Image (tube, rainbow, N blue to C red):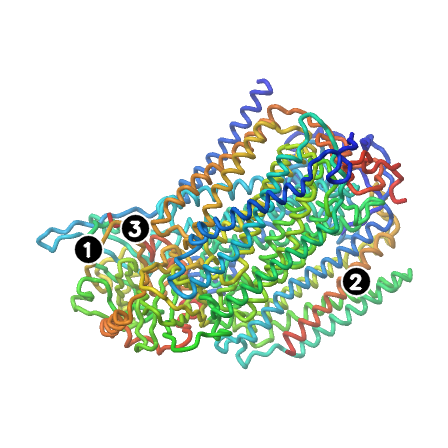
């Protein structure tokens, strides 16, 4: 093997190593999103549009998020099973019916302003069947808010005293655990990618409760892809 | 190695008078460029100057600065061009240049001129800043100067990741959209509930950082009705880029009816809001339990 | 003009004898500058947070460092610095008695570190109890580290001297032969640094314990 | 600290090593360093978990163990340095062994992969290491621009975007502090001042390996969730962030330590090791620039270290320096950080001044015009830079009454900067300019830094800055000063000095292609950013108003071209240094500066006899050469 060939080989190996490193960096880390989940169509009889079925849990658990088992999180139900994702796809200029099974206990809002339901159809929601347009600022465990669409919905926490008895420790949570069912509908406008987030300081252990899950896609932040 | 011609004193040895030629080149180009820059570039330097008193101030200011900068930039640029054309080593030759080690007069002139320039610019900037009451910039809890006459206080509450606006003189109602009456002096009281944000109302020339526990005041007087976007200008976490909302400047009547509507519509929320204060440190103020 | 290459095994003529000494002296002074700005950050934090007193959280009234141990701490520092200066003088006077002096300085400084560590255990607040507590613990802790670094420098001088007295240094090429030539520059620089650090120590004490 | 009489030849007399390979691998070398580094990392990680699980309740809730990670990094770095053999000498001194300058020096290529006290080896190590991390930073920049092709987070996630921005900024600002002083000052300052070594050879090596450790620590942030704060690391966001933030803190703290030591070493060298006759008024201007930079490094960097240590304590053991709820203040961090941060940008700019003023006399065959003015300009800048930091806080609401002062000081700092320009122009005046690649880069420096400087004056005016602060205008401004000022002069230095360092020529055609492509694409990348800022686009966003998409697309494409020009440079390096290997002359530019008078490759001890300097290195236009006077025995 002559010198020139050796040099070429060496350079080739170097380039290959660099290339793979960059490739892994880009593909595995930088461009990784949670899976996009499309909303389920609703029959015209049932009001038309699409529906999102979500749950909020106090601890995502090892099975769902091995890296951060103790983080609070949203999950979405897609054809029968719960998926750990916060990127939801809904059609443009349509109505979206949202059902949230809320298994977490209350933390209370930093800004009580968000205790009022805004931007939903009729500016209200139903909590366990009762229709309400606002709850006490100490009550929410989370909020479901899409600021760019003006949607702000506080999600009432489960009662502390029941909590000891039967509190869902780990996602995905079954209805047998103590929970609240929140339903509301909102209308989507023109296509685009809108962020949604939680306004309750539920990032336990972080400054102002706004770190960790509150700043990580897939837990308390996500996108509503209006297409 | 070196030629007698090259090391001769300036302007001799059959060389043209570079100084005169270069200076003419520079002055002519400046005279041509300056008005063009002011006329064509000037208006592009920021939002339309009619938007508010502050933007007008900023636009004049930036025009002046660009006007001052243009001849200086041209001085160096034309000099570089001139040098590239005339101060060249002929191909293949290895001539030495003249051994000029400096020129006290030129150096002194340069120092004096640049010093005067920057001092006058600084002086002018100070005058603009203070005469315009901070010219739309966040000036802390008690600004040095404040506009005379009545002011409409608007509290900007920044939180991760949304601005909400509180109108203390209208029953302390809090909204997510910013609406301002035209032609009124507005006092923005910018504060934050968590990390540092920055309230940037680009079109009306206001920028003020939102610091936790601090009341940062900025004045602006919108002078025409319009719709624009408000942005966060200080990195504040995952949704920093998404932290913007629409703002409107509307007629007095429209503003009054809008705020009345908000008061009724947002009554439930307003009821539970903390009493209006200069700044808020809500729980959890440190690590959440 | 070309500077010809060094032929292999060519005996390089020595540097001017004072170069090493001057390098250590310069280094010591620059270290003083650097450590000044390092602790300046903490002094600024102290003054700024104190003047701000963000919603009364600067210093809850019950927070008091233990004055007795604090006094021991600063006394040892000052004494240590003084003995160090004395030792430097002796060295300049070519008197062998510089050694006990510098050992004394070393021991006193270590005692100061221990005293401060004991103080941590008896004080009635921890680093998480407000701004003053934070500044107190961080500043004093980093100052202790600075002391230990300076003491390392003293220790090298002592060890070198003791070893040189036990058995003359093996004459490797490039080694320094005479002990005093070997030690004097290092000791001089170390004494300068330590005197300065003691000055910072006094500022630390006054700010954290008395102010 | 080391003291010595004689200059033992370092590697020259060492016999070639005949031991078997496996035997060579045992001992203090890079392999051991990596092994001990990893071992230390896991030891620290383990200890951290023992401590914190018992003491810090919040870490269970967050699944984020800052104590463990900080300890892991610290132990890892210590293990790495011990493995390289940095602990041996201190321990020997602790045991009273005599002081010595000599380290175990090996022959040939292997000394580039370990602790080597030869300033020329360290210079080459720096050049390669810094090149590596510049590449990493550039890759991040490319990905940032790729994301900004869209007005919503599309290609990379919002967190990853912020991390990209942070790693890009921090890597560039941190690594490039030593970007010129590391490779070129370490290599050429001793040659320029007629010395055989740096004042503290081990510290010199230490600065390099610290920087390498730091670089890898910053890159490792992606394994811990990245960090959202950009290179400024503002509190309290810093305190909120996940563990990746600790990588940033550790990186910048290590870089700070490296800076202090580097500056200290440089100043000590320049003060104590100048050859006889090399008075301060004969010092090459590059050495002066190094000196001015070193002053800033030694005084400003400790502030950074302290600031970040406070951050680390806030994050790990819940002190409250910066947490509003605990009596801290976010203003405190901004003040402390920018008190370092503004000198920092001059740490980046000053070496560029030095390189340019050092190079152009050679290529115009004229003495440096206004030597003393240039020096006062550099020293003026480094002094003034301590008095302008609060112009970074003008809309923050702190000390609003002091804004006119900071406006004034900021405007005034442009006067000493102007000195550099008049010296540049004066040196060109009626010169005999030969347009070599380094000369082109110097001219480009003038062009770019002019735009950067004047836009800086625009920014320094508070009324204007109200709009421009925190916008793309600021970003364009400091990219013009740092890329246009530092990186262009950095490449000038590479094309000018590397032939001396490695004894091989660059391919001129590729070099010219590199220059023109880089110059054009650089300007077409960053000029539009001024416009974007003026049109109201904030920094560090991956989501912006749709009407800005067009301009952003243009910028992104130009940025990709800029990246491609860097690939041309790499191709040139590979071609010239690996394949063509055309030996360079000892003095290809016919310079009269001392570093070019020694043969190529530079002998291990630089000079057989320390030359006696009888003129400054710029007497072009006259046939007298520097150092022509009889070389006296050194020390006389």
Front disc: 1 or 3: 3
Q: Which residue is at the front of the view, B11 or D225?
A: B11
Q: CA distance from mark 1 to mark 3?
A: 15 Å
Q: Tag 1, which secondary structure?
A: strand
The residue positioned 75% from the left and 59% from the top of the image is C29
CB under 8 Å between discs 1 and 2: no
The residue labelled by disc 1 is A96
Which quadrant does the C terminus of chain D fall into? top right
Helix, strand or loop under label 2: helix
- Label 2, label 3: how far apart the Cα atoms are: 66 Å
The 10 Å Cα crowd at callout 1, few under 14, some 14 to 19, many 20 or more, is many
Read off the chain for label 2. C
| Dot in front, 2 or 3 | 3
What residue is disc 3 on?
A: A193
Residue for badge 2: C191
Q: Residue furthest top?
A: A2
x then y, percent, for residue D605: 78, 37
Mark toward the viewer: 1 or 2: 1
């Amino acid at each position: 093997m002559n010198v020139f060939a050796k040099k070429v080989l060496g350079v080739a190996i170097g380039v290959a190593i660099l290339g793979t490193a960059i490739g892994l960096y880009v593909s595995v880390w930088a461009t990784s999103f949670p899976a996009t989940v499309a909303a389920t169509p609703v029959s015209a009889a049932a009001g038309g549009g699409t529906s999102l079925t979500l749950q909020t849990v106090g601890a995502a658990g090892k099975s769902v998020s091995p890296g951060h088992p103790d983080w609070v999180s949203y999950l979405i139900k897609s054809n029968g099973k719960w998926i750990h994702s916060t990127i939801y796809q809904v059609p443009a200029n349509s109505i979206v019916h949202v059902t949230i099974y809320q298994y977490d206990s209350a933390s209370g809002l930093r800004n009580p302003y968000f205790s009022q339901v805004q931007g939903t159809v009729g500016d209200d929601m139903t909590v366990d069947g009762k229709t309400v347009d606002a709850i006490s600022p100490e009550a929410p465990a989370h909020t479901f808010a899409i600021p760019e669409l003006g949607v702000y919905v506080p999600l009432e926490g489960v009662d502390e005293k029941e909590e000891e008895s039967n509190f869902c420790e780990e996602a995905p949570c079954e209805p047998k655990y103590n929970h609240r069912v929140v339903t509301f509908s909102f209308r989507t406008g023109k296509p685009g990618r809108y962020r949604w987030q939680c306004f309750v300081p539920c990032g336990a252990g972080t400054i102002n409760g706004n770190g960790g899950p509150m700043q990580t896609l897939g837990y308390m932040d996500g996108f509503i892809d209006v297409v | 190695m070196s030629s007698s011609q090259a090391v001769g004193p300036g302007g001799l040895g059959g060389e043209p008078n570079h100084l005169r030629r270069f200076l003419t080149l520079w002055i002519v180009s400046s005279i041509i460029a300056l008005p063009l820059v002011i006329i064509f570039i000037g208006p592009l330097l920021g939002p339309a100057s009619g938007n508010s008193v502050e933007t007008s101030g900023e636009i004049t200011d930036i025009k002046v600065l660009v006007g001052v900068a243009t001849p200086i930039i041209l001085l160096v640029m034309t000099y570089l061009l001139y040098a590239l054309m005339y101060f060249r080593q002929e191909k293949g030759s290895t001539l030495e240049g003249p051994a000029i080690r400096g020129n006290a007069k030129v150096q002194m002139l340069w120092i004096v001129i640049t010093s005067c320039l920057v001092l006058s610019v600084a002086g002018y900037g100070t005058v603009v800043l203070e005469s315009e009451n901070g010219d739309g910039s966040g000036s802390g809890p008690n600004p040095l100067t404040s506009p005379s006459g009545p002011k409409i206080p608007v509290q900007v509450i920044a939180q991760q990741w949304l601005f909400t606006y509180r109108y203390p003189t209208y029953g302390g109602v809090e909204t997510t959209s910013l609406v301002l009456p035209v032609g009124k002096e507005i006092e923005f009281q910018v504060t934050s509930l968590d990390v540092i944000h920055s309230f940037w109302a680009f079109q009306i020339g206001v920028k003020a950082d939102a610091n936790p526990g601090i009341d940062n005041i900025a004045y602006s007087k919108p002078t025409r009705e319009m719709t624009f976007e408000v942005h966060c200008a200080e990195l504040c976490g995952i949704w920093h880029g998404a932290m913007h909302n629409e703002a409107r400047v509307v007629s007095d009547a429209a503003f009054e009816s809008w705020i009345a509507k908000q008061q009724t519509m947002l009554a439930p929320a307003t009821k539970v809001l903390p009493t209006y204060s200069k700044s808020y440190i809500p729980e959890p103020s440190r690590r959440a339990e | 003009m070309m500077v010809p290459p060094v032929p292999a095994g060519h005996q390089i003529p020595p540097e001017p004898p004072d170069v090493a000494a001057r390098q250590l002296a310069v280094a010591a002074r620059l270290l003083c500058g650097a450590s000044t700005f390092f602790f300046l950050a903490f002094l600024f934090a102290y003054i700024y947070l104190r003047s701000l007193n963000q919603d009364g959280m600067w210093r809850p009234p019950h927070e008091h460092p233990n004055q007795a141990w604090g006094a021991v701490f600063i006394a040892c520092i000052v004494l240590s610095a003084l003995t160090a200066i004395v030792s430097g003088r002796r060295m300049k006077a070519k008197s062998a008695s510089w050694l006990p002096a510098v050992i004394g300085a070393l021991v006193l400084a270590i005692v100061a570190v221990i005293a401060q560590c004991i103080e941590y255990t008896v004080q009635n607040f921890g680093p998480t109890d407000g701004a003053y507590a934070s500044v107190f613990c961080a500043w004093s802790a980093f100052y202790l580290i600075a002391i230990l670094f300076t003491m390392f420098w003293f220790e090298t001088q002592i060890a070198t001297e003791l070893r040189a007295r036990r058995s003359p240094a093996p004459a490797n090429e490039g080694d320094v032969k005479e002990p005093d030539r070997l030690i004097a520059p290092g000791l001089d620089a170390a004494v300068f640094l330590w005197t300065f650090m003691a000055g910072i120590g006094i500022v630390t004490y006054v700010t954290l314990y008395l102010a | 600290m080391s003291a010595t009489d004689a200059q033992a030849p370092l590697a020259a007399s060492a016999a070639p090593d005949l031991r078997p390979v496996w035997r060579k691998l045992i001992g203090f070398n890079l392999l051991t360093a990596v092994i001990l580094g990893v071992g230390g990392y896991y030891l620290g990680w383990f200890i951290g978990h023992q401590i914190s699980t018992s003491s810090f309740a919040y870490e269970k809730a967050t699944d984020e163990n800052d104590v463990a990670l900080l300890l892991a990094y610290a132990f890892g770095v210590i293990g790495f340095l011990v493995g390289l053999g940095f602990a041996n000498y201190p321990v020997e001194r602790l045991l009273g062994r005599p002081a010595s300058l000599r380290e175990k020096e090996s022959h040939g290529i292997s000394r580039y992969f370990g602790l080597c006290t030869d300033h020329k080896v360290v210079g080459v190590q720096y050049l390669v290491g810094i090149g590596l991390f510049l590449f990493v930073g550039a890759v991040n920049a490319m990905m940032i621009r790729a994301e900004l092709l869209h007005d919503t987070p599309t290609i990379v996630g919002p967190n990853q975007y912020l991390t990209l921005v942070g790693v890009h900024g921090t890597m560039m600002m941190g690594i490039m502090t030593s970007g010129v002083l590391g490779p070129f000052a370490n290599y050429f300052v001793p040659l320029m001042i007629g010395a055989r070594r740096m004042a503290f050879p081990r510290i010199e090596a230490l600065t390099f390996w610290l920087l390498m450790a730091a670089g890898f620590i910053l890159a490792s942030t992606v394994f811990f969730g990245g960090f959202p704060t950009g290179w400024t690391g503002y509190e309290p966001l810093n305190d909120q962030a996940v563990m990746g933030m600790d990588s940033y803190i550790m990186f910048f703290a290590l870089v700070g330590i490296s800076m202090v030591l580097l500056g200290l070493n440089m100043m000590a060298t320049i003060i104590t090791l100048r050859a006889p006759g090399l008075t301060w008024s004969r010092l090459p201007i590059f050495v002066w620039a190094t000196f001015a930079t070193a002053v800033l490094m030694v005084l400003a960097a400790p502030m950074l270290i302290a600031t970040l240590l406070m951050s680390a304590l806030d994050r790990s053991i819940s002190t409250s320096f910066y947490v509003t709820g605990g009596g801290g203040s976010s203003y405190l961090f901004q003040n402390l950080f920018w008190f370092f941060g503004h000198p920092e940008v001059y740490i980046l700019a000053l070496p560029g001044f030095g390189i340019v003023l050092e190079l152009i006399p050679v290529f115009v065959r004229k003495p440096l015009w206004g030597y003393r003015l240039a020096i006062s300009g550099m020293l003026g800048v480094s002094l003034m830079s301590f008095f302008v930091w609060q112009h970074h806080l003008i809309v923050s609401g702190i000390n609003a009454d002091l804004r006119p002062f900071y406006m004034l000081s900021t405007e005034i700092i442009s006067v000493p900067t102007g000195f550099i320009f008049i010296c540049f122009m004066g040196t060109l005046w009626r010169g005999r300019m030969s347009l070599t690649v380094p000369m082109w880069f110097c001219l480009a420096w003038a062009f770019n830094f002019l735009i950067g400087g004047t836009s800086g004056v625009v920014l320094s005016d508070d009324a204007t800055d109200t709009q421009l602060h925190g916008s793309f205008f600021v970003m364009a401004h400091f990219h013009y000063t740092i890329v246009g000022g530092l990186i262009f002069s950095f490449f000038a230095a590479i094309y000018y000095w590397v032939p001396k360092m490695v004894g091989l020529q660059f391919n001129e055609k590729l070099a010219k292609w590199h220059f023109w492509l880089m110059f054009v694409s650089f300007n077409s990348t960053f000029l539009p950013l001024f416009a974007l800022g003026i049109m109201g686009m904030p920094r560090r966003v991956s989501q912006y108003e749709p009407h800005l998409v067009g301009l952003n697309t243009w910028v992104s494409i130009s940025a990709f071209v800029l990246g491609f020009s860097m690939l041309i440079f790499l191709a040139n390096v590979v071609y010239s240094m690996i394949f063509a290997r055309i030996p360079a002359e000892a003095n290809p530019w016919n310079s009269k500066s001392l570093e070019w008078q020694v043969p190529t490759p530079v002998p291990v001890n630089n000079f057989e006899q320390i030359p006696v300097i009888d003129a400054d290195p710029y007497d072009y236009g006259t046939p007298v050469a520097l150092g022509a006077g009889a070389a006296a025995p050194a020390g006389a």
